[in-house]
Every structure is written in structure tokens, then in C-alpha cells.
Amino acid sequence: MKVLVLNAGSSSMKFQFFTMGKEKVLAKGVVERVGTATPGLVYRRHDGVKFESQPAITDHVGALKSICDCLLDPEIGVISSLSEVQAVGHRVVHGGEQVSKPTLVTTLLKKIIRDCFPLAPLHNPANYAGIEACESLFPGTPNVAVFDTAFHQSMPPESYLYAIPYELYTKYAIRRYGFHGTSHNFVAKAAGNMLGTPYDRLNLITCHLGNGCSIAAIDHGVVVDTSMGMTPLEGLMMGTRAGDIDPAVILRLIELGKTPGEIDKMLNKESGLLGVAGIGSFDMRDIIAAELKGDQQALRARRMFTSRVVKYIGAYYALLGGADAIVFCGGIGEWSLYARAKIVRKLSCLGVELDEAANERAAGIRDVISTANSSCKVLVIPTDEELMIARSVVTTLTHPEPEIENDTES
């Protein structure tokens, strides 16, 4: 089966095109600055051929058409007809409480995605636009939505509820949902493969550390807690997001004259590593470089990041009653040997031991970076959300389950 995977953002459309027999990427790329005067397309074929252009596009349909033009091109393309695209997988950020697995796109599912617009206003409308673009250009081709929130829907109420009046949950669906679910799912299953034990027999703490960061506690294949909340703002300190914060800080900012829009921008775009380090960058590589040159503010930012990751790992270790493995993925988790080492060393009180040599070689590759005497394994596993989405498409179409009940319209 040939599967096109799309990740549609408000002004971008990323894609990967797979042939699933060997799980091979035939082509991938991105259309950026959709809707602006200077849109740009970058296309890469599996054999290294690269093509860039500035197509005249104004919306997601135009972005998808430009991608299709590349896939069909006699010189750089990989198919001779759009009919070779047998299915499309879509990353969708929010599925609310009704979606707990990858799901075939139907009229009802599209309504659920629309109903979640208020919960993910920057993402769901764009994801929805990507689906509609595919329905226009690939009539009759099945579309499957894979939700960031779905993998976390196994959380019990004591984990997903906030300690606020219960009617705010029942009336307005204010609760923890969790995100990065596709990544956590991928690396959890990969951890099982690495350890030679099905992941649903393991206790795992999966750490997706990048510009956005989240940690999940997985008890025998079931997520029992995760760090992100109703939105991706809660939890760990991130590239530009504040993470956990006393709600009274927001009340104080309002007293100081900040508007809701200004506070939203501050907490999501101007905080985290960017806001604390003060070097004009949220890239962990830049922050570590500044730290090693003696910049005390960069040191403080990196220490804050390390400390908060350690706190969540420790909490989830206790919640699970121990862990078989701690898994690192994401840009920082996979590539920042320095930050990773700082985190793991602070877990020595749990009996976790870092293999320094293994950590140094595990740059963007699967490896075990703990010693043989460590109380649990520490793994580095590069995440592959697009491949996970493609796999989910195949499973959904070859092993269909009953459609979601139409509770919202009863």
C-alpha cells in the first residue's frame, strides 16, 4: 500500500509518501508560508534528488496540488498517476474524549475535529483544511486521522481531571488530554522490540524532548499520566513554552495590565528556554554552548530544564512502582548528549546508572545508554511520527473497527 502522510499547519504542509511493503519513504518535503506572498516548496526524493520552487499558492488545496505535481513529475516524481496514492494519513492534534485510536475520516469525525477547534485553535483548523484538500484532490481515497491526544485517552480520571469545580469538566470539557501521543506510542512499541518484550508487558517512562516536550507514564501499554494538559502549554519547560506555572502568576499579569492575548503569546512563544536563557535562542545547542562559555543565565536555563525533566521522571517512576525503561526521543532527547547525561546522572538515587561511553555514541540512533547494573534500562530511540501514522493507516484500513457512535448528535 502506498500512503501519503500529511501534517498541515496554519501556513505549512509537511508530507511523506511511503510504500508500506518495506516501509520505505519514496519522497518527502514541505510547503511553507502558505497564504503569503512568498510561498516555498522543498521536495526530496528517496535517492537524494532535491527540488525547490516558489509555487503560486494561496491555500491548502494549492499546497497539496504543488506536492502532487512533484510526485507526478516525469523527472523528479515517484508515481505516474494519483490513483497510486491508496490512502492518506493526517496528523490531527486534538480529538477530545471521543477519539482513542486512529480513525477513518467520516462526516461525524470531521464534526468531532471541528468541535475541538476551541481546544486547539492553532492546529485543528489547519489539520481540518488538510483533510478537505485531500477530499477535493483524491475523491474516493480513504483518509485516516491520527490524533496526538488519542494514545493518552487511557488515563484514569484521577490523572486527567483538574482539581477545579467538576462542572467545568462536564460542561466545557476542561481536563488534561496530553499530546505527542503518536511519538510516545511509536517509541513505546520500539522499546518493547529493543528489549525483546511486548511493550504491553512493560512499565515505561517515555520522554519526548524537543522544542515541545512531554513525558508519559505507560503501565503495560496503557498511559496512566502525561505531562501536557488541556493544551500543550502545561508540563515541562520547553523551547518557548513556560510549562507548569502557578495560575496566580496569570492573575498578577492581568493586574499589571496584560491582555489575554499578550499573556498567551508570552507563555507560548516568549518563555521556556528562550525566555530564561536570554541569548535570543531556544535551541538547546546554543544554550549549552553559551553555558560552557560561562554564561550564567544560559546555565540557569539548562539547569531548570534538567531539573523539571528529572522531577517528572521521578514522579512517574513512583506512580508506576518502578520502570523497566526510560526512553528518550525528540531533538534534545536524541541528539543532546550533554543534556541527556545531566538528566540521567540525577536519577542515580533510583539506581539508574549512565553508561558514559554509550551515551556519547548514541547520537540520533537507537541504543541502550545505561549500564548493566542500572535499575532500569535507559534507551535512546529516534521517533518517527510519520511512519507511525502510515502504519496506523494500514492497520485502520485492513482491520476496521466499529465507527464512533454519534453521541454528539443525539
Image (spheres, grey):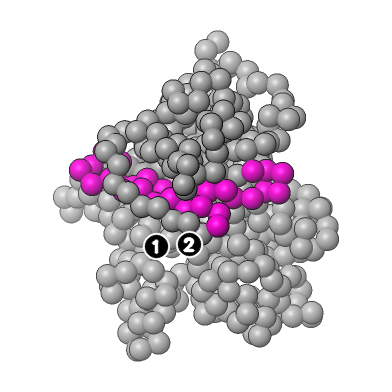
State the residue in front, 45 or 255: 45
Res 119 visible: no
State the residue in front, 409 or 391: 391
Q: The residue under label 1 is which amino acid type?
A: Gly
**Could you tell whether 402 is left or right of 55 in the image?**
right
Q: Is residue 43 magenta?
A: yes
The picture places residue 283, in percent across and down from the top left corner, at 39, 69
Q: State the extent of the magenta-drawn residues as a range.
A: 19-47
Q: Is residue 374 magenta?
A: no
State the residue in front, 95 or 161: 95
Q: CA distance from mark 1 to mark 2?
A: 7 Å
Q: Residue furthest top?
A: 410
Give the label on residue 210, or none. 2
The picture places residue 182, in percent across and down from the top left corner, at 59, 47
The picture places residue 271, in percent across and down from the top left corner, at 32, 61
Location of residue 360 by image quarter: bottom right
Residue lying at 46% horizontally and 70% vertically, measured from the top left:
305
Give the label on residue 184, or none. none
The N terminus lies in which quarter of the figure? top right
The C terminus lies in which quarter of the figure? top right
Q: Is residue 396 depicted above or below 315 in this figure?
A: above
The picture places residue 404, in percent across and down from the top left corner, at 63, 22
Tell whether label 2 touches label 1 (CB within 8 Å).
Answer: yes
Q: Report the residue marked by disc 1.
A: 239
Q: The residue under label 2 is which amino acid type?
A: Gly
Report helix, strand or loop for mark 2: loop
Q: Is residue 275 depicted above or below 186 in this figure?
A: below
Residue lying at 42% horizontally and 75% vertically, measured from the top left:
285
